[in-house]
Image: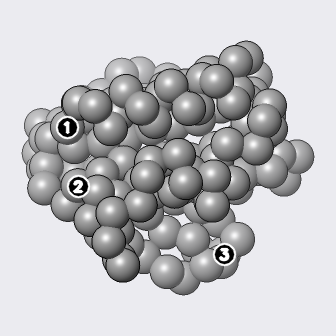
């Protein structure tokens, strides 16, 4: 994949999608669901929020800020994936909604043991926390 591409994903028990002909399909098998971000007309970004960040605990807001996720009004779509619901997820959603009040924030809870985050040939496997993917342009259907 090109080094400029951002991608995030999580381990899942069921993969859901559509066929080339437009039909629905679901496969009940363990695997990884990935979201890839590379849109020529948009700026994309990604982030991780970790409870066990290297060098000790770093506040959620500081982690998001340092990765560009809170640049006011910049992002129109944010995908958020976590392994567990709780206080950290609520804080992340609060910060994202405050910084990007018009953004579509979507995502879900992965059911496996790991989430993935990759950008510029650096791949991270996270067993806790949150991964996210941002786009500066909303999808048009």
Label 2 belongs to which residue? 128
Residue 63 pos. (x, y %): 51, 56
Quadrant assignment for the N terminus: bottom right
Residue in view at x 35 percent, y 34 percent? 89
Judge left or right: residue 131 versus residue 139. left
Of circles 2 and 3, which is in front? 2
Q: Work out whether mark 2 precedes mark 1 in sequence or the reverse, and give the earlier one.
A: 1
Residue 113 falls left or right of residue 35: left
Discs 1, 3 touching: Cβ within 8 Å: no
Q: Which mark is residue 2?
A: 3
> Is residue 17 in view?
no
Q: Residue furthest bottom?
A: 121
Tell which residue pokes out farthest to the right in this image.
Answer: 41
Element carrying mark 1: loop
Which quarter of the picture shows residue 103? top right
Quadrant, the C terminus = top right
Residue 72 image position (x, y, % from top left): 78, 36
Question: Quick check: 82 above or below 113?
Answer: above
Q: How is the image coloured?
A: one colour
What is the spatial separation of the Cα atoms under label 1 and label 3, in whole angstroms?
30 Å
Q: CA distance from mark 2 to mark 1?
A: 8 Å
Residue 84 circle label: 1
Q: Residues within 10 Å of mark 1 (few under 14, many from 20)?
A: some
Q: Position of residue 110 (x, y in %)?
A: 23, 41
Relative side of 110 to 107, left or right: left
Looking at the image, residue 96 lies above or below residue 5? above
Residue at 58% across / 32% down in the picture?
Answer: 96
**Residue 107, x across and y down, in percent:** 42, 31
């Amino acid at each position: 994949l090109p080094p400029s591409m951002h991608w995030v994903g999580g381990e899942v028990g069921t993969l859901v999608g559509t066929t080339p002909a437009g039909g629905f399909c679901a496969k009940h098998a363990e695997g990884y669901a990935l979201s890839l971000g590379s849109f020529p007309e948009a700026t994309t970004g990604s982030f991780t929020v970790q409870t066990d960040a290297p060098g000790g605990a770093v506040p959620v807001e500081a982690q998001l800020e340092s990765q560009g996720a809170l640049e006011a009004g910049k992002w129109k779509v944010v995908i958020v994936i976590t392994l567990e619901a709780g206080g950290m997820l609520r804080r992340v959603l609060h910060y994202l909604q405050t910084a990007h009040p018009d953004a579509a924030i979507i995502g879900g809870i992965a059911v496996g043991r790991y989430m993935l985050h990759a950008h510029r040939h650096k791949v991270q496997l996270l067993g806790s926390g949150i991964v996210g993917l941002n786009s500066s342009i909303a999808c048009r259907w």
